[in-house]
Amino acid sequence: MVPTEYYVALSAIIFVIGAVGVLTRRSAIMIFLSVELMLNAANLSLVAYARQWAAAGAEVALSGQAAVFIILAIAAAEVAVGLGILVAIFRYRSSTDVDALSQVRL
Amino acid sequence: MFTFFLLAGVMIVGALGVITLKEPVHAALSLVGTLLTLAITYVTLQAHFLAAIQVIVYAGAIMVLFLFVIMLLNVQSEPAAPQLSWLRPAAYITGLVAVVALVATIVATRQPLPDAATITATLRGGGADAIGEALFNQFVLAFQLVGVLLLTGIIGAVSLVQRRALEAEQAGSSRSQPSRELTDVSS
Amino acid sequence: MSALVSVAALAPFVALLGAVINGAFGRQLKEPLPGIIGSVAVGIGFALSLLAFLALLFSDVTSVSVPLWSYLEAGGLELELGFVIDHLSVLMMLIITGVGLLIHIYSVGYMHGDPGFSRYFMGLNLFVAAMLLLVMGDSFVLIFLGWEGVGVCSYLLIGFWYRERLNADAARKAFIVNRIGDVGFLLAMFLTFKTFGTLDIAAVNEAAGELVFGSAVLGVIGLLYLLAACGKSAQLPLQVWLPDAMAGPTPVSALIHAATMVTAGVYLIARAAPLFAQTPAASEIVAWVGALTAIVAAVSALAQTDIKKVLAYSTVSQLGYMFVAVGVGAYWAGIFHLFTHAFFKALLFLNAGSVIHALGGEQDMNKMGGLGKKMKITGRTSLIATLAIAGVPFLAGFFSKDAILASSLNSELIGSGVGLYLVLLFTAVLTAFYMFRWYYRVFAGAPRLDKKVAAKVHESPTVMTRPLVILAGFSVFAGYLGLPEFAFPNWIAHWLEPALETSVSFRHPSAATEWLLIFVSIAAVALGLGLGYYVYHLKGGALAKRYGSTAPARLARQGLGFDALYRAVFVRPGEGTASGLAVLDKDLVDRGITGSFTTVGLLAQFTGRLQTGFVRSYALLMLAGLVLLVIAVVLFGGLS
């Protein structure tokens, strides 16, 4: 079987790619997509650790997978609200460029 | 092992695509690919239920929402950045350092896997029943809160999008108020 | 009986109540009302004092203590506040409340229409309260409390018309010079406590009697109390504030700077009489300070042109007489002169106030003259007061001054009695001269008034003239309380005996010698008055005109240059030091402060760069921080 470290390392790489995406993209939509990448990277390591901790019993091991489930739900809520905000900002400024929002006002 | 590296390669390429592709739609589709690959990875990790909802909720619902918004706003590729030109190289360097540091840490804390039988017995294939038991025992409060959060999210999203329309309506009605007196009789 | 006496302890509190009422509600009250409140408060105080006086007069009780409350207990220091009402303090209370009452009533007329009417009476009542506290206190602490209280009131009332810079300056000057004396008082109290372990006056006096005659520590304590007394009573070298204090309203000058407050120094020394009687060295210095002050001030008074400044220097000079008296050990004579002086000097000031009032604020004697015809009451009472202070026989000043002259010659406490006598005798000539000049220039001779002013000259209202008449009566008769002892009954010396009991002894020359001395002082007064008549009246005052603007006259006019001297010796170096320190402050301290905030500013400029306002740069910083954290954990966290 593939060792846990491989999965976690993959998760780390995806996470950093997502983080760099957040930093380098200026469109709010693209930043959003990158944030989704980071979330999923975290999920991957959680699932990998769930397998790693199998010897500790179902309660411990399955909590990793349950956490992923909850994160999925939260991500859904976040996307809904985030995209709502995005639409609101876009309506107001006709742009999704976050650099244009350097003053804390609309 | 081969499967893993294949999946990992596709996933990394997909992720790079998300952050490099200029067209938002392309990037979003690249993300869909990545998420689908991730779902397959979940299967190899004995998380079948998560794999399923990853496909249905993430690659399905959420990404559709993204594409919908992208098309709604008709977002074009972003113009060249006039400010913060130093940020891009700085971000790449930081990212590189972060990858090296994280991978080094992970490799340094290597631990042996339990045997396959134990894994299968404990995770039970990560099916809906296994996760359901965890959710409704240990995480029942968190589960309820997530429900509330989703409700809040829905209301929030609706109100955010709706408010402008409401204001516009109010502005319109106040502007038309003088004439309403005239039209009152007829209505 | 003693219960009746102790009721008088209420007097300061009644006056204080008057001050509180005037201070709190005075602005709402219509004009004469604050004056009436103030006068009634002092009047009650006078009634209480009179009651106490009569009770003491017709009983064998000589001293009544009224304990108030325990003020402080710390280690060996126990401060019990209390009043002592004995023959000395009751006499002072009568002077303060009696003369104070008359001046309060007078002020109702004098301050008529002043916007600060109620503030004035608040200050005056507060002063009376503090002064009563001073004379009634049974410990040095309470005396000091009153001492500071009268100082503050003096400051407030000198600067009463504070909008004019000159008045405010005069008030500050008085306050600062007084503070110098107060330092002496404080040091004296410290040393007293260290030596005797108590600050109760009776206990200190008793303990001082048991110490070795002429012991050094007593001398030092005495000199420190003398410094305090010099500050308050305007003696050399701290006399400079009193002439400037004339900036206040004239009734204030009469009450505070002539009749009562300035005599506090004399009172203090008399109170501590047993202590001073034990230290001839300090006593001799007291006497000589008094004598020098008397002559210096008298010379200064010769050439003054301001109607009030003549009187101010005269006050300083007369206070010098009192210091000589308490210095040579004739404490009763000092208090006696204090008593008579309070009447005729208050009267002189009130007369001056009446004149100033009539002339619409004019104080220059060069623009007066001949006023006696238009202001009959003021003129006549002024004549009485002038003759009384000059020492004309059968008036108050004659007896008290003569008592001092005789005591200085006969005292066995000090060795230089003859010198003191001669100085005082010469001063008596000068006194008669300058007082004649004062009266003649103001009330007699040809008028030198502006025509506009001359038309409006009028006698002051009744509320002002009645007090003048009463004071004039006292100026005539107050002296009969202390007739020369060798031939007549001397009531006041015997009255004060229980309170001023000391071991000082006096020589008793033959009656013929005593009579001779009296005739010598009468001759001195006659000489002074005659000289005045010669200089100012004969040939239309030609002599006065010829010598009036010569250099010695100018020097005298400037108070013999003490102000200039102090300016050169103390004020200039003080200003120099201050400006030097200011430079130091600017160049060193300020630079340091500017430097520190420039550093902070530069730091802020640098850190401010980080606050771009761009979300993405913040995100980068977060990520970088996170990475550093991970690296730190890997390197130092001791993983596996």
Image: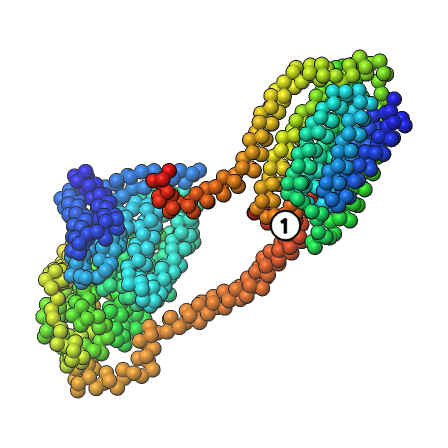
- Image position of C259 with respect to B2: above or below: below
Q: Residue at x 33, y 74 (%)?
A: C558
Q: Position of residue B170 (x, y in %)?
A: 46, 42
- Observer-nearest of C628 and C534: C628
Work out which quarter of the rendered image holds the C terminus of chain C and state it: top right
Q: Position of residue B95 (x, y in %)?
A: 78, 42
Q: Tell me which colouring the rendered structure shows.
A: rainbow
Q: Residue at x 86, y 22 (%)?
A: B112
- Image position of C202 with respect to B57: above or below: below
- Image position of C178 with respect to C611: above or below: below
Structural crowding at the residue carrying mark 1, measured as other residues with C-alpha within 10 Å and reported as few (<14), some (14–19) or many (≥20):
some
Q: Chain of mark 1?
A: A
- Observer-nearest of C298 and B103: B103
Query: Do we see residue A87 in this rendering?
Result: yes
Q: Position of residue B168 (x, y in %)?
A: 49, 43
- The residue at which mark 1 appears reads as A100
Q: Residue at x 52, y 64 (%)?
A: C582
Q: Mark 1: which amino acid?
A: Ala
Q: Residue A70, located in which quarter of the rendered image?
A: top right
Tell me the SS state at disc 1.
Answer: helix
- Image position of C511 with respect to C523: above or below: above
